[in-house]
Image (cartoon, grey):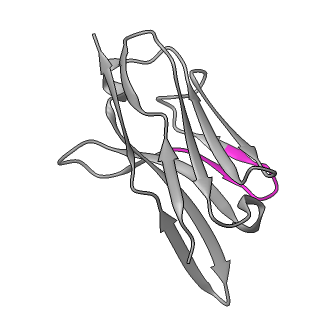
């Protein structure tokens, strides 16, 4: 069973920075896609950024130029560096790992870490 454990959330003022980490129980290079999503209570979970196993990354327009995702295969850890944070970035952030196998898609989620940006 895959386990994903996020850390690094917290309270920060607008304009500040935070770095989220997602430690995976398996090799991060073994997943077809990994990424970060966020969710505000009462709203749908939305994509923040994803990266494929061959290194192709994708960012939501709302975070482009401010957030940077990286992956350390040796530590089996995915990171999200968040700069120039805005109050609208406030949400619970979730790590996702996706694996494709025999025509099926398997999604694994972490428990989430709260990010709160004060104005």
Q: Is residue 54 above or below residue 107?
A: above
Write the residue at 57% across / 48% down.
Answer: 22
**Image quadrant containing the N terminus:** bottom right
x 65%, y 77%: residue? 100
Residue 15 image point, x, y percent: 44, 9
Q: Quadrant of the C terminus?
A: top left
Whether residue 25 sits left or right of residue 118 in the image: it is: right
Is 24 placed above or below 88 here? Answer: below
Please tell me how many numbered marks the rendered image carries. 0
Q: Residue 86, how many percent across, how many down?
A: 38, 18
Rendered position, 2 above or below 18: below
Residue 26 lies in quadrant: bottom right
Residue drawn at x 35%, y 51% is: 45
**In this picture, which residue range is highlighted in magenta?**
48-57
In the picture provided, is 42 more to the left or to the right than 15? left
Q: Is 29 contained in the magenta span?
A: no
* 66 sits left or right of 92 in the view: right
Residue 54: image x %, image y %?
A: 82, 56
Q: Position of residue 38 (x, y in %)?
A: 39, 44
Of the pair 56 and 16, the residue shown nearer to us? 16
Chief secondary structure of the magenta portion: strand
């Amino acid at each position: 069973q895959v386990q994903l454990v996020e850390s690094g959330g917290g309270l920060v003022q607008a304009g500040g920075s935070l770095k989220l980490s997602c430690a995976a129980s398996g090799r991060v290079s073994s997943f077809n896609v990994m990424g970060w999503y966020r969710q505000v209570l009462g709203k749908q979970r939305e994509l923040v950024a994803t990266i494929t196993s061959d290194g192709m990354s994708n960012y939501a327009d709302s975070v482009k130029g401010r957030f940077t995702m990286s992956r350390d295969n040796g530590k089996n850890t995915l990171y999200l560096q968040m700069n120039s944070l805005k109050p609208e970035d406030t949400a619970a952030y979730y790590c996702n790992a996706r694996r494709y196998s025999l025509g099926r898609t398997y999604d694994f989620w972490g428990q989430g870490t709260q990010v709160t940006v004060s104005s």
